Amino acid sequence: MKKLIVGLGMSLAITGCGQTAGPVQNSFLREAGTQVDTGLFGDATMNNTLVMNGERDYAISLAKRFAEEVPSTINFEFDSYRLDAAAQQVLTVQADWIRQFPEIKFRVYGHTDAVGSSSYNKRLGLRRAKAAVAFLSARGINRSRLEAVASFGETQPLIVTANRERKNRRTVTEVSGFVKRHPTLLDGKYAEVIYREYVASAVPPTAISETSGSGFSNEQ
């Protein structure tokens, strides 16, 4: 038994001197817990600290998440600011996401295609933005969180053309900042945000997520 222990000790000593260890020795020498720690432990605390120190812009982080997780754009028929069924479904998804983050403000930007005068299109873009904001408000989003809507009219087309183009006739919803003096932000309770998302993840899928194809159903 002593010989076995001495032999193992010599083997480990040689390994420490630079020789390549075998699979069994590598497993034996590995620090406890490294197999289960994938690098995510402590992230909530780290983010909380960085946000409170101003080292990480929480608004930018949420803006990126919103753009990745939620369709931010709806489209309109020519010369119209009426919300069709598809637009209403997208805005419903937006409202569901926005309700998770009561500390965040959003702004809706209106756009048009290039047909018509610039002044008319500026007004039309604003009507479209206001229509989207009204729908979000009707879905339970406090109007004070939907910051002043804005219109770019025809000045920022997705597709540069003088003709009618549906993709240019749109509104875009974006994160714009924080609700002033919200207690969650003052206390830096990043863990509460994570917990809200955890609870929300347990909600059964809706008809929207179960629909194939475009990802949206025609149900209201």
Image (cartoon, helix red, strand yellow):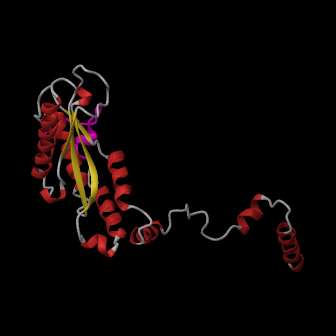
Magenta region includes residue 8? no
Dividing the image into 4 quarters, which one contains the N terminus? bottom right
Magenta stretch prevailing secondary structure: loop
Residue 212: say if magenta.
Answer: yes
Left or right: 201 as drawn, with respect to 51: left
In the image, is residue 160 above or below residue 44? Answer: above
Residue at 34% from the left image edge and 56% from the top image edge: 62
Any part of residue 218 in sight: no
Vertical side of 171 occupied by 50: above or below: below
The percent position of residue 71, horizontal first and vertical second, equals 28, 41
Q: Residue furthest top?
A: 163
Residue at image position (28%, 58%) is 177
The answer to whether residue 160 shows anywhere in this view is yes
Question: Where in the figure is residue 70, as x and y percent of width and height?
Answer: 30, 45
Percent coordinates x, y for residue 154 in the rendering: 23, 31
Snapshot quadrant of residue 123: top left
Q: Kindly indicate the quadrant of the structure image that contains residue 146.
A: bottom left
